[in-house]
Image (cartoon, helix red, strand yellow):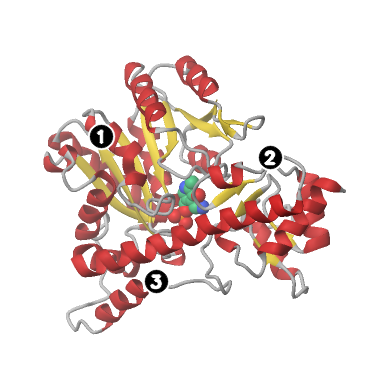
Amino acid sequence: VFANVVQAPEDPILGVTVAYNKDPSPLKVNLGVGAYRTEEGKPLVLNVVKKAEQSLINDPSRFKEYLPITGLAEFNKLSAKLIFGADSPAIQENRVATVQCLSGTGSLRVGGEFLAKHYHERSIYIPVPTWGNHPKVFMMAGLKPMSYRYYDPSTRGLDFQGLVEDLSAAPEGSIVLLHACAHNPTGVDPTPEQWEQIRQLLRSRSLLPFFDSAYQGFASGSLDKDAHSVRLFVADGGELLMAQSYAKNMGLYGERVGALSIVCKSADVAGKVESQLKLVIRPMYSNPPLHGASIVATILRSPELYHEWTVELKAMADRIISMRQELFNALQAKGTPGDWSHIIKQIGMFTFTGLNKEQVAFMTREYHIYMTSDGRISMAGLNSKNLPQLADAIHAAVTT
Ligand code: PMP
């Protein structure tokens, strides 16, 4: 009965790892997937996560019972506090409905399905370019993905005028997806002044912000600084959605731990919204997994573990920033044609190199360097051993 099923293409991002795994060369380097690697090129389990896991194992009162549909209540509270700030008026006024979801992706999907069911506008404006999964997640949730200009290839910076024009022309009430910080794939963020202008524009046209925060703390090394854009929108008292992921900032990728928060106008509305979120979640996966959320709650509730986490997080962010500088220096030293200053200007996990599809294919073929075909490289996969190989490859790609 399934004989007519056609072979589906690989995922454009995760497919890079599939190709990498098939390459027998000892020289191969995977800069495709956005996962942190140490200077030794190894995946990292944060020390603070190991400590939290140990304390969970040692706790005799712990069971493996189901969580409620909305997840671990303490985790939800602490997650909202982390992104909105402990002194957030929305939290103090109990206007936030937070549910634990399956990492960032699950939070986006649950938020999308809630909007498709309960919001009057289906169009969701998504930046161009964006994380490749965004349009698919929202389409499957029943929304209508639309696009707004974001990146200008000629300046390798923000197309602020294009953004303003497109969002000014969006039908009133449309949903707007915003990357809270460290925009993926471009590494280009609005300045604080531009964020304020974006806020005014969205609020004046009743556009509904849907924030995606996959990199809090990873961009600058500061959890508060990386939440600036979101807090600006919460401070004006308006509504918004927030999808949070702990994949990168706690290195909990495979634990699938995240949260969806919906900031409402009153505690009464937030309660009703939460009741409807339960109806979205129950038929999808009943309730979320316990382990990852318990790790996060253990860390966020303890002032010592929290502090330790911020130190480890900053070390990851700093290593990425130093790789940016080293790559830039290496290309300068080689005299590679072109302006490569965007490598040090862009922030977060990725550099949007500006290399085209053919150049990317050349680098994979000749140098065994794997990256997405849009020229995005994960800076977190670089180290002082493989960095010269990448610089050689980029130099060869633009000069041959
Ligand atoms: N949003 C963005 C912008 C991302 O880059 C990612 C991860 N690459 C996600 C959401 C979701 O990640 P996860 O589901 O692993 O939390």
Asked if the residue at tag 1 contacts the one at tag 2, i.e. Cβ–Cβ closer than 8 Å, the answer is no
**Which secondary structure, mark 2?**
loop
Label 2 is placed on what type of residue? Answer: Asp
Task: Answer with the quarter of the image where residue 221 lies.
Answer: bottom left
Quarter of the N terminus within the rendering: bottom right
**Which secondary structure, mark 1?**
helix
Disc 3: which residue: 46
Q: How far apart are labels 2 and 1 at the CA level?
A: 38 Å
Disc 1: which residue: 234
Label 1 is placed on what type of residue? Answer: Val
Residue 355 numbered tag: none
Residue 339 numbered tag: 2
Of mark 2 and mark 1, the one earlier in the sequence is: 1
Q: How far apart are labels 3 and 2 at the CA level?
A: 36 Å
Residue 244 visible, this angle: yes
User: Is 369 on the left or on the right of 187, as rendered?
Assistant: right
Task: Answer with the quarter of the image where residue 286 lies.
Answer: bottom left
Q: Nearer the viewer, residue 376 or 203?
A: 376
Residue depicted at 61% across the width and 42% down the height: 341
- Mark 2 is surrounded, within 10 Å at the Cα level, by few (under 14), some (14 to 19) or many (20 or more) other residues, namely few
User: Is 64 on the left or on the right of 258, as rendered?
Assistant: left
Which of discs 3 and 2 lies nearer the camera? The answer is: 2
Query: Is 71 situated above or below 87?
Result: below
Query: Is 91 situated above or below 296?
Result: above
**Where is residue 289 drawn, in percent x and y?**
34, 65
Q: Nearer the viewer, residue 204 or 314?
A: 314
**Where is residue 171 drawn, in percent x and y?**
44, 16
**Which secondary structure, mark 3?**
loop
Residue depicted at 62% across the width and 35% down the height: 156
Which of discs 2 and 1 lies nearer the camera? The answer is: 2
Of mark 1 and mark 3, the one earlier in the sequence is: 3
